Image (cartoon, rainbow, N blue to C red):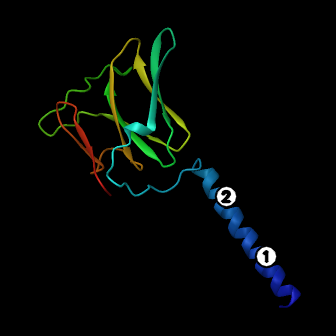
Amino acid sequence: MANTELKSRVTSFAVASAVALLAGVATGGATPAKANSGESRSSCIQANRVSHGYSDSMKFTNVCGTPVFIIYCGDTPSGAPSCQGGRHSNYFTHSLNVRPGMTASAALRQGGDIRWGACDGTIGFGNDGYFTDSPDGRYGCLPR
């Protein structure tokens, strides 16, 4: 292999690596949505309430080796009705993606109630068929 050809290949690899690295930085390290197996992952989550004096938060830590999404509802700072579900449900009104080893937080009013579930994979904004829920708070994770 000619020296010039080798330099060209090394340069092309370096440029492609830099572009991939910058793409990850620009998106906050986000990765495309992971395929969801449809399995519950509540056992992967350690949930701890933290009081801030004027408000609370629930800290969700993913202790498993795969991404997990949390669905929840409760006494959030917005004060909007939550955990009520209707004819077409929408019992769970919020969601969070939690990568392996990471922690995500849900803001609550001081002393507020929270109900949550967890599923394998990641979720976008809204449900779009990632889980089902019913007005009594039961949920099921769906494969995608």
Going 61% across and 51% down the picture, which residue do you hit?
26
Q: Residue furthest front?
A: 43
Element marked by disc 1: helix
Closer to the camera in the image, 45 or 83: 45
Up the image or down, 89 lies above or below 112; here it is: below
Closer to the camera in the image, 128 or 111: 111
Task: Give the class, few, some or many, for how many residues have Cα within 10 Å of label 2's Cα (few <14, many ≥20).
Answer: few
- Looking at the rendered structure, the kind of residue marked 2 is Leu
Tell whether 135 sits left or right of 51: left
Tell whether 126 sits left or right of 88: right
Q: Which residue is mark 1?
A: 10
Location of residue 24 by image quarter: bottom right
Up the image or down, 22 lies above or below 132; here it is: below
Task: Give the class, few, some or many, for how many residues have Cα within 10 Å of label 1's Cα (few <14, many ≥20).
Answer: few
Element marked by disc 2: helix
Q: Residue furthest bottom?
A: 1
Label 2 vs 1, first from the N-terminus: 1
- Looking at the rendered structure, the kind of residue marked 1 is Val
